[in-house]
Image (cartoon, rainbow, N blue to C red):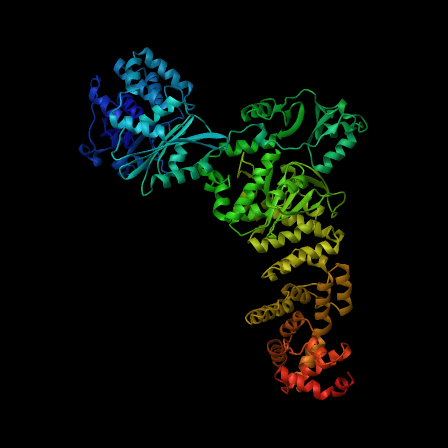
Amino acid sequence: MEVITTHLNADFDTLASMIAAKKLYPNAKIVFSGGMEKGVSNFLKESYLTGFSYSKVKQINLDDVERLILLDTRQKGRIGVFADIVDKKGIDIHIYDHHPPSDDDIKGSLERISSLGSTTTIMVDLLKEKEIMISPEEATTMMIGIYEDTGSLSFVSTTAEDYMAAAYLLSRGADLKIVSNTIHAEMTSAEVLLLNDLNSNIVTRRIKNVDIVIAKASSEKYIRDAATIVHKIMDIHNFDVLFALIRMENKVYLIARSRLKEVDAGEVAALFGGGGHPTAGSATIKDLTLIEAEHNLFKFLDSSINSIKSAGHIMSSPVKTTTSDQNLKQTKDIMAKFNLNVMPVLEKNKLIGIISRQDIGKAIFHGLEKNKISEFMTTDFSVAKVDTPLSTVQEIIIEENQKFLPVMEKSKIVGCITRTDILRILHYETKKPDESTDSERHKRNLNGLIKGRLPKWLQEILEKVGTRADEMGINAYLVGGFVRDLLLGRENLDIDIVVEGDGITFAENLARDFDARVKSHKKFGTAVIILPDDFKIDIASARMEFYKTPAALPTVEAGSIKMDLSRRDFTINCMAVSLNRKGLGELIDYFGGLRDIKDKVLRVLHSLSFIEDPTRAIRAVRFEQRLGFNLGKQSLSLIGNAARLDFFGKVSPARIFNELKIILMAEKPLWALKRLEELDIMRFIHPKFETGKEFCTLYNEMEKVFDWYDLLFKEELYDKWIMVFALLQKPLKVSEVGTMVKRMGLSAKIRDKTCDIRKNSLKTIKKLEKEKLDDTALYHMLIPLKLETLLFMMAESNNIRVKERISRFITQLRNLTIETRGKDLQAMGLTPGILYGKIRNRLIDERLKGAIKSKEDEVTFIKENWRSALNNE
């Protein structure tokens, strides 16, 4: 048995396709797998169609079905009981459909799938191919099917094939009066009420430059022809996009219509468990109120709508330019400095040409390096305006083979688009659904993550940043580690903002919005905004940088967000999120950072990265440890080259120490330290630093000491990292430690703690090993030492007596105090001076012996032992 069937709620496109399919499969039975729209039901009741008949599902024995012909759908979940036989051995499935693919699609032995305005168009084309004749009644029904699904040939999904199919049907006698009367059939009183209810509850929301219309209504009864009513509203108001949410009985029904390619109605409906195609979609929503469904709709729209793109959306700005009076060598040096392949050439601030690195190289090869670039530049080129559509930009770059496209505004060059920019866009646009993850399809706008993962107060700060940027007419972006950690779901409240403009001026204006202070650094175009609660926001001008020599600090110049991101260390740190209202939440990822986060790989941007700044290698180890990532094969090779060529030796010891310090401050730094030695980097920090067996043994003992002290819940804090740093210094002599800390330019505090450990730990341990040592002697031996030194000795010594004595000192003696203060001594008639210190030490000794237990005892002791001093006063 052959069966022709379709989805659960048949419309006119379905009915028309069935009539055509019956011509192709004359022995097949037509079966509606579910219900049909009211308009279809009425049409069949009143229809003058001759010879059309259909069977009910219950009349079909599924075991007898040998061939299943699916029309206007291929989703298993939308064909009712026929889903039970699609996997049956030997079943022959033929599919005719115009909808986009989905995860629930059935595979057929014969498939005719095409992105046309209706499935009827596909069927009419087949009838024409096979020269199968149709009656005027059949042509009329098929015309209704095409008109319904293409909005009377007005939807953006309408194709030339739809028009040609309609023309053919007209030639076969289709009656346009019947088509019009059917499409615009008279409504019942309930349908009129629903139309008025929807019309009275229309709101327009602008999302990503697209006007989205939402209409809501409620009805106690189910209205079968609700989709037709929504279509009427679309036509009455000439909306481009309409989403209707209608509560009928105990469910909410979504009916979506779109004439814009940026809004895929079927995709949005699919997020609610429904489906459709780009111009029309629907879904039945259970267990949600109308308000909850509307809330989810806005959330889904935010993530699924594509901004209408133009040159201004994808261009890089500002553009590095040169002037026509520069010679080839000068221009080549500039290009090498900023890693540019093409530069626009200006004359009196007017764009007159484009010069490429390739053309310069050829000219210099012929000994023409001193010639002006104006003699070799390209003068025949196209330009774009800021609002030039992306499709036009693609035509210029691809069809005219122009690698570099200047973007102009009022005769000034304001940006540029390269072939790489276009390839990247084409790559994402042509990706098949099964080739990209859900995050790649729906999370390239991070608004949902920002709202879901950031505290409300921080969201409000970012909103103010975007508002201020809009008011000043500049672009503002969240950048760097904050974006990375947002994607990883890690907490990070270090806000870095980059603006394409004057960062300091922007910071000063933004600070007024918060009643905050500003600290600026004009040399680098950076500023820090300090809010009243001391929360800090880092602001920087988008900039490019170059290194005059390997390992030197960079020279900075103003640049675009793309140039700013390209100067950073690793791809995972080279992403930005737009904060302006236009493009709010859009993820900017030129270098594949999102992909590397997914793959947990650390990649540098270019092969000279570790030569220009060798400290990036230490940073790489830190990120490996902190994020659980792995260095890519190429990055590992580049680190090895930088070490072999001794570029680490050209970095100042202070810069290397700053990177090492961050590693040491990690909760568990051992793995990272061993990794530095494995990569041959540790010797550049100090040639005697090593992380062998002895180091690891002592480090593990140190971890036990840390845990012990932390469980005491003492108020006094200590620097764990300084102790690990001191552990690295064990192979050094005391004199070498002094030289090292001076060379690294350590602060006085760090220097004192480090030297205290190295100078005092071993000799003090030897003293503590003696058998006889009362509390007084213990106190005076250990009280001069810093807490870090005491804890270091506990870890370093294997002697139980030493550990117990240090433990006793820390827990019972170290915080010993006397109650008599200087003002008390003065009140007793004693003159301030050296005597006060002597008295304090004697009181502590007596406290340690247990002879004094209270302030009264202290006063009595003072009076008895310093009677002469008191009498003299």
Q: Position of residue 619 (x, y in %)?
A: 64, 52
Query: Up-down: is 240 above or below 485?
Result: above
Image position, residue 427 (x, y; %): 53, 33
Q: Nearer the viewer, residue 337 or 321?
A: 321
Nearest the viewer among 198 and 590 is 198
For residue 321, say whether it is visible: yes
Quarter that holds the C terminus: bottom right
Compared across the picture, whether 107 is left or right of 549 comes to left
Q: Position of residue 419 (x, y in %)?
A: 61, 30
Give the number of callouts.
0
Q: Farthest residue to the left: give it.
A: 59
Residue 360 lies, in percent from the top left, at 74, 29
At horizontal 72% and vertical 87% (from top left) the residue drawn is: 865
Decide: is 723 above or below 555.
below
Q: Quadrant of residue 575?
A: top right
Q: Is residue 330 above or below residue 487?
A: above
Quadrant of the rendered structure where residue 255 is? Answer: top left
Q: Is residue 590 visible?
A: no
Return the residue found at the far bottom. 864
Q: Is residue 124 above or below residue 648?
A: above
Tell me what residue is drawn at x 67 percent, y 36 percent.
559
Residue in the image at 71% along x and 75% along y:
784
What quarter of the picture does the N terminus occupy? top left
In the figure, is residue 495 to the left or right of 781? left
What is the quadrant of residue 256 in the picture? Answer: top left
